[in-house]
Amino acid sequence: MQPILYLLKPGFYDGPGDPYYCPYCMIFEGVLKTYPQLKDSLKVCYVSFEKPRKEIIELIGEENQSCPVIIFDHPLDSSIPFKAKKYGEKFFLNEPEEIGLYLSKEFKIPRPHF
């Protein structure tokens, strides 16, 4: 399975007022735009803000449906300085800094500077 990056669809509502976008998801919109070759090696899926987010829940459980999240089938190699979380047979990262480092190491793009 290709890694799957889940991002929130922009323009969602959370109560009254103007629509929102997720600033953490927008980081990866910029990364995908700057490094379009990532889309050849990575599946990108957009989900609604409203919960439950069934697509994510089916892979990594209800407690892990936050976005952004990247899901993959194998443990991380030892050069990545943190451990992926595991749910069943799937591994995932749900912190923007970790996702950015994973994309850098796995797909040979520059690393993020947080």
Image: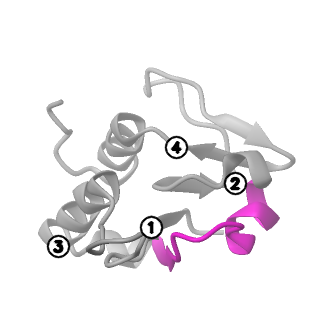
Residue 25 falls left or right of residue 50 = left
Residue 93: x %, y % from top left: 54, 42
Give the residue at mark 1.
15
Residue 43: x %, y % from top left: 49, 75
Give the residue at mark 3.
33
Q: Amino acid at mark 4?
A: Asn
Mark found first going from the N terminus, 3 or 1 = 1
Q: Is residue 75 above or below residue 31?
A: above
Which numbered circle lies on residue 73? 2
Choose mark 3 or mark 1, whichever is in front: 1
Choose mark 4 or mark 1, whichever is in front: 1
The quarter of the displayed image where residue 112 is located? top left
Choose mark 4 or mark 2, whichever is in front: 4
**Which residues are drawn in magenta?**
42-60
Mark found first going from the N terminus, 1 or 2 = 1
Q: Quote the CA–CA distance across marks 4 and 1.
A: 25 Å
Which numbered circle lies on residue 94? 4
Residue 96: x %, y % from top left: 37, 42
Q: Residues within 10 Å of mark 4 (few under 14, many from 20)?
A: some
Q: Amino acid at mark 3?
A: Lys
Mark found first going from the N terminus, 4 or 2 = 2
**Nearest to the observer: residue 19 or residue 25:** 19
Q: Amino acid at mark 2?
A: Asp
